[in-house]
Image (cartoon, grey):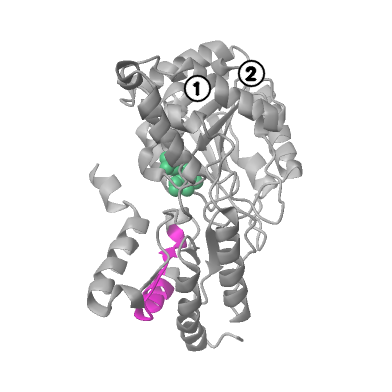
Amino acid sequence: MRETLKNSSAIRKMFIEGQKLAEKVGAENVFDFSLGNPVAPVPQAFTDALMDVIRSEDSLALHGYMNNAGYPEVRKAVADSLNRRFDLGLTGENIVMTVGAAGAINIVLRAILDIGDQVVAFRPYFGEYRNYVANWRGEIVEVAPRLPSFQPDLEDFGRKVGPRTKAVIINNPVNPSGVAYSAETLTSIAGILKEKQKEYGHEIYLISDEPYRELAYDGVDIPYVTKFYANTFVAYSFSKTLSIPGERIGYLVISPEMEQWQEMANAISVSNRICGYVNAPSLLQKAVARCLDEKCDVAFYDNNRKLLWGGLTELGFECVKPEGTFYLFVKSPEPDEQAFVARAKAHNLILVAGSTFAMPGYVRIAYCVSPDTIRRSLPRFRELAAEYGLNG
Ligand SMILES: Cc1ncc(COP(=O)(O)O)c(C=O)c1O
């Protein structure tokens, strides 16, 4: 763990620095854009569902052990809801309830990776993927983005998928860039993977990490990946949709198009157990099953997005317009983004260095803060822009 500790979360580090700064200058004067902790209110329907479950269910059954994949009726409710929305042909057997998206990704990797297998990820990516892949002694292989769009460079992707590639992980929409992958992009990714499977004569799995699926703006469509490629898993989480990341609840979809998907579903279920999760929290399973169509106030984040993206680009900062998530990925005005992060901190602006996301030269700004924080931060960003002589 010593190596892991050395590179451990730069996001947390910035959050702690923000807290220290708040002690010195007062919390109201610190603009902390470090953490992806949701701030849109938890939907009342979720709180009501929790209370209702506690009051109405038999308590021993509710709090007892269960099938490692989750309650059958909850898995069926998830499958029915996905079928209604995306027309997928899923049954409850294709669903495993998980300890968030993080749990879902780990149990898949546990099930499919042999030591030394490669997992391809598209830069910039959620830095925890490095740790998740390392957990199971895999090796991460990075694909470059096309700039300034931050869409994947598909030629580089084709080059990076090799004989040791066991899986490819995508995140749609993307933390940290906020871009969304279109049906066309997914078709191309699937096309390349189909060819590579043939060429190397073994399965290559696509893992689509989708905790931000519901946080998409301007009517942008996040296509359902199982429609594009048979060997697909989708990791979903209620952390962001319902603003409940501490509750640790999500699910994994195992595509019914996958050959021997039942065997895979069994493997994943055992994986859930032996990774130590055992099963997703029982109360939470029952509660989310009652509000599968609920979501937090997405307009709240959209408003923040417009306010901050508009404000920063007007000041001369370069930033791809995000179509989803609650992050902006801004080009550092100097090559060393760590130096930029330090200069921003001198203006009480807490940002996260892009190297955390395998993308030096950029910084991530999490706009899951109050609109008032954004409004009050803009004069600070103006001072920062002026230091770099940007044309605001
Ligand atoms: C891209 C991405 N994947 C996975 C996760 C983990 O989500 P969960 O809280 O559902 O485990 C996060 C959390 O921030 C994330 O940003």
Specify whether residue 347 is painted magenta: yes
x, y percent for residue 303: 59, 65
Question: In the rendered structure, which amino acid carries the disc numbered 1?
Answer: Val
Image disc number at residue 256 = 2
On the picture, is 277 further left or further right than 81?
A: left
Q: Residue at x 35, y 34 (%)?
A: 135
Q: Residue at x 74, y 37 (%)?
A: 187
User: Which residue range is magenta in the image?
Assistant: 338-355
Q: Which quadrant would the C terminus be assigned to in this image?
A: bottom right
Quadrant where ligand 1 appears: top left
| Residue in front for this viewpoint, 191 or 234 | 234
Residue 191 vs 70, above or below: the answer is below
Image disc number at residue 74 = 1
Please tell me whether mark 1 sits on a helix, a strand or a loop. helix
x, y percent for residue 236: 52, 36
Quick one: label 1 or label 2, which is nearer the N terminus? 1
Q: Mark 2: is the Cβ under 8 angstroms from ligand 1?
A: no
